[in-house]
Image (cartoon, coloured by chain):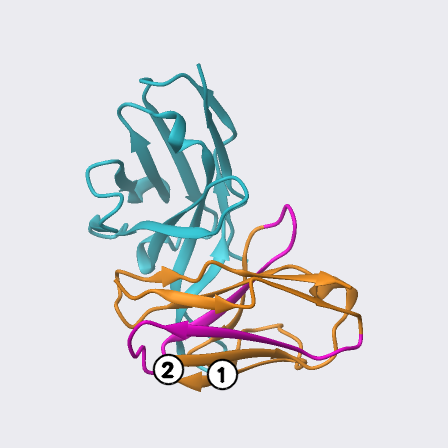
Amino acid sequence: EVQLVQSGAEVKKPGESLKISCKESGNKLTRYWIGWVRQMPGKGLELMGFIYPSDSDTKYSPSFQGQVTISADKSINTAYVQWSSLKASDTAMYYCARWGYYNSSGIHVAAFDIWGQGTMVTVSS
Amino acid sequence: EIVLTQSPATLSLSPGERATLSCRASRSVSGFLAWYQQRPGQVPRLLIYDASNRAAGIPARFSGSGSGTDFTLTISSLEPEDFAVYYCQQRSDWPLITFGQGTRLEIK
């Protein structure tokens, strides 16, 4: 069974850098798009962007373009999101999720079907 | 950007009752709409994809309908574990997918 395992919670100060990770357990990361989703405290879900680890093709949501960098290392089945200078407003839970899979009937399902457990990032002085 | 508006914001019902949640898109998304459930402290779970198809392992009491701009998630008879927040999400504008703001389904 494929799992996405994210790195642990982080507490950082404003201005610090950070890179969080999402490792896929089934050695199939390169076959799917991986999305990163932000959930601020008590709020809804927001897409940050997608990466296709096979060739590192990356697509950002406009609100996150220039604010974060999404990357992947296919050799270790891991995707990342990083910040160069954190702000208090980056405090949130961050999820990685697999986008697109073939179900048992061979039908392609274009949705987020497997989610990581989430990484809580707290930015506070 | 396609904006998804969910209603109501909060729905208060009792176990055994029928729940009807709505999602309206700012422009047509055809049938490219999914629904997710997020229980407190848990990760989101895919319920419905492409408007009306249940994901693997999702109970038959969950059903989705709609096309274009108006969509509905129906839970035919609420179980205690169904009280959660529900999000709709469109993929018509992929990769610029968007989520609705959520409907909180609470126990009355």
Between A2 and B98, the one nearer to me in the picture: B98
Residue B31: numbered disc: 2
Task: Judge the density around disc 2: few (<14), some (14-19), many (≥20) Cα neighbours within 10 Å.
Answer: many
Amino acid found under the numbered disc labelled 1: Ser
Numbered disc 2: what chain?
B
Task: Judge the density around disc 1: few (<14), some (14-19), many (≥20) Cα neighbours within 10 Å.
Answer: many
> Which residue corresponds to mark 1?
B52
Span shown in magenta: B16-42
Assign the N terminus of chain B to one quadrant of the image.
bottom left
Tint of chain B: orange
Q: Earlier in the sequence, mark 1 or mark 2?
A: 2
Residue drawn where x is 39% and y is 32% of the image: A90
Q: CA distance from mark 1 to mark 2?
A: 8 Å
Disc 1 element: loop
Name the spot of residue A3 as percent of width and height, x first: 51, 51
User: Compared to A45, does B79 lie above or below?
Assistant: below
Q: Which chain is cyan?
A: A
Amino acid found under the numbered disc labelled 2: Gly
Outermost residue to the top: A125
Numbered disc 1: what chain?
B
Residue A118: numbered disc: none
Assign the C terminus of chain B to one quadrant of the image.
bottom right
Residue drawn where x is 44% and y is 31% of the image: A91
Between A2 and B27, the one nearer to me in the picture: B27
Magenta includes B28? yes
Between A33 and B101, the one nearer to me in the picture: B101
